[in-house]
Image (cartoon, grey):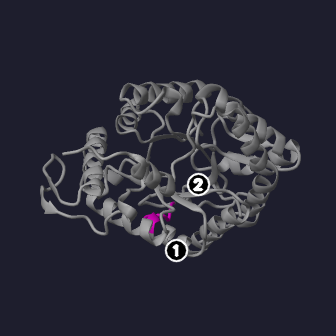
């Protein structure tokens, strides 16, 4: 099972000091967080895509390419790549290029984002969000899988004899996770292609997450990719951890209360009770995270949001130390002990190449 962190790249004032970091400071902080993620033994760093304040990450491939050059084994991913407003041709090219630069340590999470105005900014209609996601991904798959593509659709100009460059590394495209919080159509899309399904798992109660993941698993099996419990599932989540829960709650409360997404709403206590947000001791984070398996089954990737809501870099790095030293080693051991042998690990470039090479070619 893979463990890592993701960043949505928000630039938020620290409520305890009133100071807002600059874009440059926040970007440099994310680079340090990614390096620290590898240093403490975690597996994955993922970065979101946004095109509006208060976020800075408008070009995650640029940032991830830099991180690739400063790391050795870290899997690089996106928290969201906007399949609806990016041109599939550009996605195919950018992520194949990143895949080469990172030696295959790349996958991506496709989504529609959470900012409505981004659609007209890029010449699209938000009312077409689902059809855009379906058509654009169908084209993206062909651009990666076929050397020469003739294509015509509804939302972009046709392609004739087009070859996307560079071609995917070793002839194997980056693995794709389809990210959605509430759209069964996206879970269906992930199942149809045999891709991964990533549920953010931050804002919604456990029963909602269970229904979405169960639906994806059933459809994955329906399309013949394997048994339902072999479907590839990832979860997000947010934690704040200190040696004892009282210190964690006291320190995190001002950040929670003023967070741009969930601040000024339910209390911290209500939110942690009703959603997967976990604020407490290492053992509380371990117990809560292990509990996710009870309602989504054995899954392949767990990413934690640790740098949201104005948390200073020093605090985030301390969080990563605790995760790497006290939390994730226990989670690895416990999840692995409970996982049946037939449930696969998270795909990597190496495993995808091996699976391709092990599959007999069908005679023409």
Q: Distance between the residues labelled 2 and 1?
A: 16 Å
Q: Check residue 165 in the rendering and tell me which mark sits there, or answer none.
A: none
Identity of the residue drawn at 55% across and 30% down: 209
Residue 281 at x, y = what percent? 84, 44
Q: Give the range drawn in magenta.
A: 55-61
Q: Is residue 157 left or right of residue 102?
A: left
* Mark with earlier residue (2, 1): 2
Queried whether the magenta region covers residue 56, the answer comes back as yes
Identity of the residue drawn at 13% across and 56% down: 157
Identity of the residue drawn at 37% across and 32% down: 188
Queried whether the magenta region covers residue 310, the answer comes back as no
Which SS does the magenta portion mostly show?
Answer: loop
Residue 270 at x, y = what percent? 71, 31
Write down the residue under mark 2: 6
The local secondary structure at tag 1 comes to helix
Nearer the observer, disc 2 or disc 1? 1
Task: Determine contact: label 2, label 1, CB under 8 Å.
Answer: no
| Quarter assignment of residue 294 | top right
The quarter in which the N terminus is drawn is top right
The quarter in which the C terminus is drawn is top left
Of residues 97 and 156, the one nearer the viewer is: 97
Quick one: label 2, few (<14), some, or many (20+) residues within 10 Å? many
Identity of the residue drawn at 30% across and 50% down: 141
Write down the residue under mark 1: 66
Q: Tag count in the figure?
A: 2
Of residues 258 and 232, the one nearer the viewer is: 232
Is residue 216 depicted above or below 17 in this figure?
above
Residue 332 at x, y = what percent? 72, 45
The local secondary structure at tag 2 comes to strand
């Amino acid at each position: 099972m893979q463990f890592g962190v993701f960043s949505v790249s928000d630039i938020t004032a620290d409520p305890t000091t009133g100071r807002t970091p600059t874009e440059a400071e926040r970007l440099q902080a994310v680079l340090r967080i990614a390096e620290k993620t590898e240093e403490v033994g975690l597996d994955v760093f993922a970065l979101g895509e946004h095109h509006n304040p208060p976020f800075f990450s408008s070009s995650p491939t640029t940032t991830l390419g830099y991180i690739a050059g400063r790391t050795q084994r870290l899997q690089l991913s996106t928290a969201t790549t906007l399949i609806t407003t990016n041109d599939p041709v550009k996605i195919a090219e950018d992520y194949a290029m990143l895949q080469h630069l990172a030696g295959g340590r790349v996958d991506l999470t496709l989504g529609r984002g959470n900012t409505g105005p981004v659609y007209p900014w890029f010449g699209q209609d938000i009312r077409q969000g689902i059809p855009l996601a379906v058509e654009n991904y169908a084209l993206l798959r062909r651009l990666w899988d076929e050397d020469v593509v003739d294509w015509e659709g509804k939302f972009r100009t046709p392609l004739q004899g087009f070859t996307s460059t560079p071609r995917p590394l070793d002839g194997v495209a980056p693995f794709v996770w389809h990210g959605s919080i509430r759209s069964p159509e996206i879970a269906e899309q992930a199942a149809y292609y045999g891709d991964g399904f990533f549920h953010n798992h931050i804002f919604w109660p456990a029963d909602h997450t269970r229904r979405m993941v169960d639906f994806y698993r059933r459809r994955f099996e329906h399309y013949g990719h394997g048994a339902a419990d072999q479907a590839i599932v990832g979860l997000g989540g947010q934690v704040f951890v200190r040696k004892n829960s009282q210190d964690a709650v006291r320190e995190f409360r001002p950040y929670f209360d003023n967070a741009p997404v969930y601040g000024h709403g339910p209390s911290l206590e209500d939110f942690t009770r009703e959603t997967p947000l976990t604020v407490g001791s290492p053992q509380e984070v371990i117990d809560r995270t292990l509990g996710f398996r009870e309602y989504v089954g054995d899954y392949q990737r767990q990413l934690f949001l640790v740098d949201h809501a104005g948390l200073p870099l020093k605090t985030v790095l301390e969080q990563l130390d605790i995760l790497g030293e006290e939390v994730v080693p226990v989670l690895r051991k416990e999840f692995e002990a409970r996982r049946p042998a037939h449930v696969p690990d998270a795909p990597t470039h190496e495993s995808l190449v091996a699976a391709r090479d092990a599959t007999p070619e069908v005679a023409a």
